[in-house]
Amino acid sequence: MTQRPFNLFNQDLLHEASYVHGEWVQAASGKTFVITDPGSGIVWANCPDNAAEDVNNAVQSSYRGFLEYRGFIARKRAQLLLEWHRLIAEAKEDLAKLLTYETGKPLAEARGEIEYSLGFAWWFAGEAERIQGTIGASSNAERRVLTIKQPIGVTVALVPWNFPIAMIMRKASAAFAAGCSMIVKPSPETPLSCLALADLATRAGFPAGTFNVLTTSLENTPRLSEALCTHPLVAKVTFTGSTRVGKIVAGLCSQGLKKCTLELGGNCPVIVFNDADIDQAIDQIMTLKWRNAGQACITANRVYVQAGVYEKFAAAFSGKTSKFKTGHGADPANNFGAVTTLVGLQKAESQVKNALENGAKLRTGSGKPLVLPSSGESSQFMEPVVLTGMTQDMQMAKEETFGPVCGLFKFETEEQVVKWANDTSLGLASYVFTKNSDRLWRLFENLQAGMIGLNTGNGSAAESPFGGIKQSGYGKESGKDVAVAEYLVEKTGTLTVM
């Protein structure tokens, strides 16, 4: 039995069906799964539990959509992206409400995610007309060497639950700019916002099959994803999620030598030197760390503070953190929402317990679930936790947190902290705060991550190439040329002129 704890201005944006070739469809099995509000435990929607048997029809549809859409000139693709941008902006409040009840994040953060997401449609509308080939000189006087770039074909996006609209917009906008079609498999926690985006894409004028959506439960996700990755008509897969699953996706794609973009885990270090502007650093790290209750791949995972300012930083950062008001995201009085999954909450509890057992101290928060009148006993709330006295042998130093816990580590020298920061198999993002310009350059070069914040917290934007190194994946999303290139093939022509 479902309860709808909210109303939308446009009820037509709420769909409890998958979307294939412009039609709302159910799973072949007839089975469904439930969507639960993390802030209350209320089941408020059902979606089709698609399985591997549903994949071929969606891919065939996407291929037909691609054959039509690839013929659209770049200006037309740009116009469609701009119209999609307009419709999403118009539906901002409804989309924000869906996000809050799917993820648990506060409404203000949900609105912020949509504003951030709109940048991708706008940016890639411009990129559509910047796709260019080349004409080059040849070593043979009678020859000319030419290159052209063409859309790769049917693409698949496997997206996470933490920023479900932003992740889809970043991937789909690039694919549409290039002239590709896309099948999205949203996370089981957050299918409704994805389905609303598909609805708006059709209203914007994208052809049937250009944007298909297959929803599925956590249980069916592996089999359905495998069927998508290995289908012979799928030419490219883009995945955002854990390193463990990313390796599986890469292995499946390798069977057909398919192009693959992976944006994976990120045990991201933040380094604050004695000469940093402490107020600036704290303001940047507060936003970086605590948005979406710490559930972001590029969030501050390990905060290293130099000994000379450690206590000052710890006191000020803990003081600001303690002022958050935790509660249901739909209540505007709250600015810190629920943890989206119980597994995430349990991991946060485990990391706090491990740190305390090994000598760390709680500066704010409890590291335990916060039971509220609205949440019941199975609460997914946790007040943000700040720990001091952290060491490199603790669990938090070795694995991604992805939750409302922040550990402060003390360091002495630049050489020491660079070694600690790089002591991970992951390399998504790193952050440095210092007023020494020479040091900024050294750390930009020496930190092993795909993105480096230089006196900057979150630098993610449509115009900025996004992607990691090491076991944080490969390929780029966002940025000039590089993101669209992930959805293109390049052909070389050799012309003889007599």
Image (cartoon, rainbow, N blue to C red):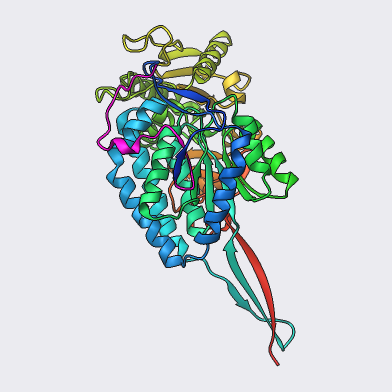
Residue in front for this viewpoint, 296 or 87: 87
Q: Is residue 458 magenta?
A: no
Residue in front for this viewpoint, 319 or 103: 103
Q: Position of residue 7 (x, y in %)?
A: 27, 29
Left or right: 143 in relation to 268? right
Residue in front for this viewpoint, 488 or 186: 186
Quadrant of the drawing holding the N terminus:
top left
Residue drawn where x is 41% and y is 61% of the image: 78
* Magenta-colored span: 1-22
Q: Determine whether 129 is above or below 495 in the image.
A: above
Residue drawn where x is 38% and y is 21% of the image: 318
Residue in front for this viewpoint, 161 or 27: 27
State whether residue 356 appears in this view.
yes
Left or right: 139 in relation to 411? right
Q: Position of residue 36 (x, y in %)?
A: 42, 21
State whether residue 457 appears in this view.
no
Residue drawn where x is 38% and y is 40% of the image: 196
Number of numbered discs: 0
Quadrant of the drawing holding the C terminus:
bottom right
Q: Main secondary structure of the magenta part?
A: loop
Q: Position of residue 353 (x, y in %)?
A: 54, 10
Q: Quadrant of residue 473?
A: top right
Left or right: 169 in relation to 238? left
Q: Is residue 10 magenta?
A: yes
Residue drawn where x is 31% and y is 30% of the image: 107
Q: Position of residue 171 (x, y in %)?
A: 50, 47
Left or right: 498 in relation to 436? right
